Each structure stands twice: as structure tokens, then as C-alpha cells.
């Protein structure tokens, strides 16, 4: 997650070159929260599909 936040912050800093350290800290916190929420949603989606119910189409033993 840290790499994703760092990439977003670099892109943001290119457009907003005159940020104070306090502003940068606030933006980094918001980006971190946003990325964490996205990862939570993605993890929930992946676990939902990781154990699909058996439909009887697989090999019979």
C-alpha cells in the first residue's frame, strides 16, 4: 500500500508544487485512507469468489 500512496503523492506533487509540509501531510493521510478503503473492497471481492459453490460440473470421484 505504501508504494501506491507514494506514487499518488509524487503525481500530486508535480501539479501542486507549493504545498506546505502540513498540507502534504493532510493529503498523504487522505490518500492513505482512500487506498486502504479500495484495498478492503478488493479483498472482500476476492474472498467472495475464492470459494465458489460446487455446481456439479467438476470431475466426479
Image (spheres, rainbow, N blue to C red):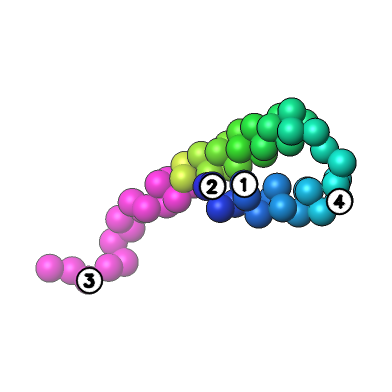
Q: Nearer the viewer, mark 2 or mark 3?
A: 2
Quick check: is 18 in the magenta stretch?
no
Task: Kindly report the distance in space between the C-alpha atoms of the residues bearing marks 1 and 3.
Answer: 44 Å
Q: Position of residue 50 (x, y in %)?
A: 37, 53
Instruction: Give the labeled residue for mark 1.
Output: 5
Question: Which image quarter: residue 61?
Answer: bottom left
Earlier-in-chain disc, 3 versus 4: 4
Q: Pointer 3: residues within 10 angstroms few (<14), some, or many (20+)?
A: few
Report if the CB atoms under discs 2 and 3 are less than 8 Å apart. no
Q: Can see residue 40?
A: yes
Task: Give the magenta part as a residue range.
Answer: 45-61
Instruction: Give the labeled residue for mark 2.
Output: 2
- Dot 4 falls on a residue whose secondary structure is helix
Instruction: Give the labeled residue for mark 3.
Output: 59
Image position of 5 with respect to 58: above or below = above
Earlier-in-chain disc, 4 versus 1: 1
Amino acid at each position: 500500500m505504501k508504494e501506491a500512496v507514494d506514487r499518488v503523492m509524487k503525481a500530486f506533487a508535480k501539479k501542486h508544487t507549493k504545498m506546505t509540509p502540513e498540507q502534504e501531510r493532510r493529503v498523504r493521510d487522505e490518500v492513505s485512507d482512500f487506498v486502504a478503503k479500495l484495498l478492503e473492497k478488493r479483498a472482500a471481492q476476492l474472498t467472495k469468489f475464492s470459494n465458489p459453490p460446487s455446481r456439479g460440473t467438476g470431475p466426479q470421484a
